[in-house]
Image: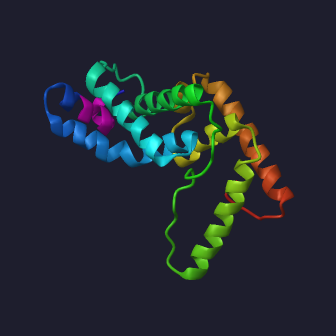
Amino acid sequence: MNTTEDRGLVAYERFLNGDEGGLAVIIDEYGDRLLRYINSYVHDEMTAEDLLSETFLKLIVRRPHLRGEALFKTYLYTVGRNEALQYLRKKRCEVSLEEWLPDRQAADVYQRVLQKEERSAVYRALGQISPLYREVLYLTYFEQLSCREAAKVLRKSSRQVTNLLYRGKQALRAVIQREGVEYEDL
């Protein structure tokens, strides 16, 4: 991978070379979305903020030398996921889906209401499928990671992620149809 294609890796290399502005770029670029991702595990915003801080702290203290084999975002999300899973192992908490779905903006009130109903239906449906299916759907659709990148985060092969993605969409579609909701994006 060419580092000029990966803004996160370029910013990280700036940070490694002593430019603190590189770290600021990383936090600005990934902080909010990574916080939502971590919060999808712990279902507590303050805890998610602490885990986000731990994720960035590991980046600052350990200063791993990334070879550019994967996107910087993939590395960062893997560290964030591991922090959340470690926290959950300690606390034995349930994984929640709240805060997973990003807010949508619409031009008019009718469109916003319709989108909110669709979002609620998808949210309810996601709560009824396997946690592994939820996670792979979240990473690929909401975080827009490729199957290869999601495979690295989940520690699975690309083929396994492709199969999980297919089965997850089928399961989600079945739940949504069973509830009688029409949702064209699946």
Depicted 50 relative to depicted 85: above or below: below
Q: Left or right: where does residue 39 sit relative to residue 8?
A: right
Residue 101 in the image, given as x and y percentages of width and height: 57, 54
Q: Which residues are magenta?
A: 2-12
Q: Left or right: where does residue 129 sit relative to residue 9?
A: right
The number of discs equals 0
Any part of residue 63 in sight: no
Closer to the camera, 40 or 43?
Answer: 43
Q: Quadrant of residue 176?
A: bottom right
Query: What is the quadrant of the N terminus in the image?
Result: top left
Queried whether the magenta region covers residue 7, the answer comes back as: yes
Residue 7 in the image, given as x and y percentages of width and height: 30, 39
Q: Residue at x 60, y 26 (%)?
A: 158
Closer to the camera, 82 or 29?
Answer: 82
Q: Residue at x 55, y 28 (%)?
A: 85
Residue 4 in the image, given as x and y percentages of width and height: 27, 34
Residue 138 in the image, given as x and y percentages of width and height: 59, 44
Question: Which residue is at the far front?
Answer: 91
Question: Which residue is at the far left?
Answer: 18
Q: Left or right: where does residue 96 sit relative to residue 107?
A: right
Q: Residue at x 52, y 29 (%)?
A: 87
Depicted 88 relative to depicted 7: above or below: above
Depicted 63 relative to depicted 72: above or below: above
Magenta span main SS: helix
Queried whether the magenta region covers residue 76, the answer comes back as: no
